[in-house]
Image: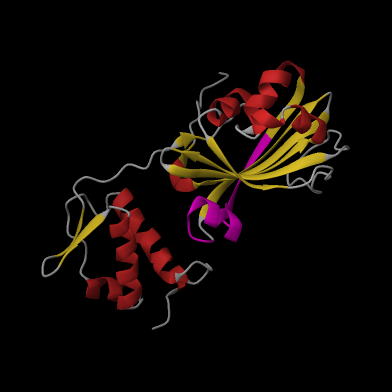
Amino acid sequence: MPAPKLFSHSPQPLYLQAAALFRSHIQNRSWRPGQQIPPLEALVETYGISRATIRQALGQLEQDGLIRRSRGSGTFVNAELPETPTLLIPKTWAETVELSNLLGTVSLVEAEAGLPLPDPLGMPCDAGRDGSFQYLRRVHTTEAGPFCYSEVFLASALFRKHRAQINKSTVAPVLDRYYGARLTQARQVLNVIEAGQESAEALQIPVSSPVAELRRYACIDDNVVYYARLEFPFRKVRMEFDLLAGR
């Protein structure tokens, strides 16, 4: 049967779209802990997708520990739902360093030095961008598994000087430790994008899953020495704001 408009505008597999929709029912308590969810035929009629697709979607939720299926009794939301550990998206340089210190690092690609910065950066930047850079592609981890996919450009001279530490650490804490007092600019923008093949594989999420993309740069003497593009799965991050700050 053809998929309804609800599912027609995403390249993500249909069963993953359905799983995301069903997951939202659990998260917003439309399907409550311990409650039996609608039977298969009712879901087929409501959403206009096949039994096989719905079974795949429910299998994904069962794998995630959100539901249990009992032959002859139906499908139930688990009474105790697993908590997905989350970390705060940083809003300041200090928070960036603090978060970076919590993450492990696995190197995926370390290109030859001498590369230019990408053009454009994908964010406003009026600082100088000359010089050569070392390119690093990495995945950063927590105890709960992959947390962040990153592409980093670091001034080649800084990389050579601190290579041993950078190979064991995220870049921001090393940059802060040795050059924090000399930073003249540090800016960041957040976008919502879909994960591509490389980042999806590194983060162990489906291709086209929504991710928070951070682009950031830092300058010494108003010249960019660090530029990074990072992707975080939405389920593993949160944002908090003091709405009365500055009053």
Quarter of the image where one finds residue 135:
top right
Residue in the image at 30% along x and 64% along y: 58
Task: Look at the image and tell me in which quarter the N terminus lies.
Answer: bottom left
Quarter of the image where one finds residue 97:
top right
- The image shows residue 49 at horizontal and vertical percentages of 36, 76
Colour scheme in use: secondary structure
- The image shows residue 212 at horizontal and vertical percentages of 56, 46
Segment tinted magenta in the rendering: 188-207
Residue in the image at 32% along x and 76% along y: 52
Residue 192 in magenta? yes
Farthest right residue in view = 130
Residue 228 in magenta? no
Vertical placement of residue 34 versus 245, above or below: below
Farthest left residue in view = 72
Task: Look at the image and tell me in which quarter the C terminus lies.
Answer: top right
Farthest bottom residue in view = 1
Q: Is residue 247 left or right of residue 159?
A: left
Can residue 196 be seen here? The reply is no
- The image shows residue 211 at horizontal and vertical percentages of 54, 50
Can residue 182 be seen here? The reply is yes
**Along the line of sight, which residue is nearer the eye, 231 or 6?**
231
- The image shows residue 163 at horizontal and vertical percentages of 71, 32
Vertical placement of residue 158 versus 29, above or below: above
